[in-house]
Amino acid sequence: MSQPVKLMGMVDPHVHLRDMEWAHKATFASETAAALAGGYWAVFDMPNTPPNTFTRAALDQKLATFQAGAVCDWGVYFGASRQGNWAEYPQVMADTCGLKMYNNPTTGNLFITDPSIREQHYQAWHGVIAVHAEEDVIPTVLELVRKYRRWTHFCHISSAAEMAYLIEAKREGLPISIGVTPHHLYLSQDDLPQLGSRGLMKPELKTPADCRALWQAVSDGWVDVIESDHAPHTLTEKMSDRPPYGVPGLETTLPLMGLALHEGRISLVQVVALLTTGSQRIFKITPPPDTYTLVDFDDSYIIESQNLRTACGWSPFEDWRVYGRVLEVWIRGQKVFDGERVLVSNGFGQRVICG
Ligand code: NCD
Ligand code: ZN
């Protein structure tokens, strides 16, 4: 067998885990187990799964539910509300990994269009701000970055035009980072006839030319993080007349990056940055001692839904041949995953303290 690679503290800074009001889809226990199987040390959870994390009370409920259920380490975002919930910020900032602001339509109708409301959120929040901003909304958010200098992470960039705006902003020296998902890299509108509603997510799949532009930006080093945007929905829901947006990704992100490595699209040094140090730098976090993942990037296998741990039990990458088997995951000196089984009980995971 080839030499395993040691990845120090893999982080996925963009997941939508389910529990509480959406426990029929999945739980923090099931999805953090999927995270371990995907090689992750820690995942950062978005605020838009009900009950939405827009108030202190909802945050407390989520923190307690994570504390009881999670098997990997975790962080949670606070959500910027349409009405303006900045009065809460001083009391919640220390317990979160960042603020999430939606500026385009997504699940749950949480997006903000009023420029003065956006601006007040920017004024009030002092940590990392993760934004959902598509196409021509990006320059308006960049105006706020220019004015307030808050570190802004642009989530799931999915088109050539969006990437061009952000490369320009990086050249200007603005404090921003860029996240891209594996599905926007590997899948396009051309796959929709075959994928059906399993290819529906926000932002939506774009053209093959957009995919090429995203790969170019990854290989040129403009992209900071590959984030899964893991958003599991049951297959029954996805097959219904009104399918919800979202696809799972925690268990396929690492081996899809392994595939990119195998195909010569990116180097191992880039894989490491995209899955570990990129997020660590943005969120100012240090993995605990003896926290790492052993991966065999030469081992290839086929993605099969029956082998997935996510409660939704399907993947848009089903039947794909990928590279990179997770051999072991260690957290705080404890082996937590042995390649087949999760070895710790619910509640082992701890909250990640961001700097
Ligand atoms: C997300 C989900 O289902 O939680 N879906 C998605 O397509 N990314 C929510 C969202 O739209 O952000
Ligand atoms: Zn998302």
Image (tube, rainbow, N blue to C red):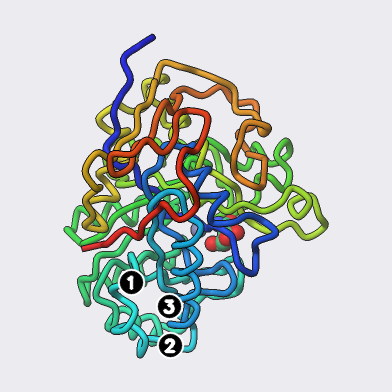
Identify the image quadrant of the C terminus.
bottom left
Residue that extends furthest to the left in the rendered view of this protein:
173
Which disc is residue 80 wearing? 3
> Is residue 171 shown above or below 144?
above
Q: Is residue 120 left or right of residue 54?
A: left
First in sequence: mark 2 or mark 1? 2
What's under tag 2, amino acid-wise?
Gly
- The residue shown at (50%, 74%) is 61
Q: Amino acid at mark 1?
A: Asp
Q: Which quarter shows the N terminus?
A: top left
Residue drawn at x 67%, y 56% as measured from the top left? 25
- How many residues crowd around disc 3 within 10 Å: few (fewer than 14), some, or many (20 or more)? many
Q: Is residue 41 visible?
A: yes
Asked whether, in this view, residue 58 is left or right of residue 239, the answer is left
Residue 313 location (% of width, % of height): 67, 41
Q: CA distance from mark 3 to mark 2?
A: 7 Å
Residue 84 has which mark?
2
Pointer 1: what residue? 95
First reached walking from the N terminus: tag 3 or tag 1: 3
Q: Quadrant of ligand 1?
A: bottom right
Question: Residue 165, how many percent across, how many down?
Answer: 34, 56
x, y percent for residue 116? 38, 87
Identify the element where label 3 is drawn: loop
Q: Residue at x 54, y 74 (%)?
A: 52
Foreground pick, 54 / 136: 54
Does the numbered disc 2 mark a residue whose Cβ is under 8 Å from ligand 1? Answer: no
Dot 1, crowdedness within 10 Å: few (<14), some or many (≥20)?
some
Q: Amino acid at mark 3?
A: Ala
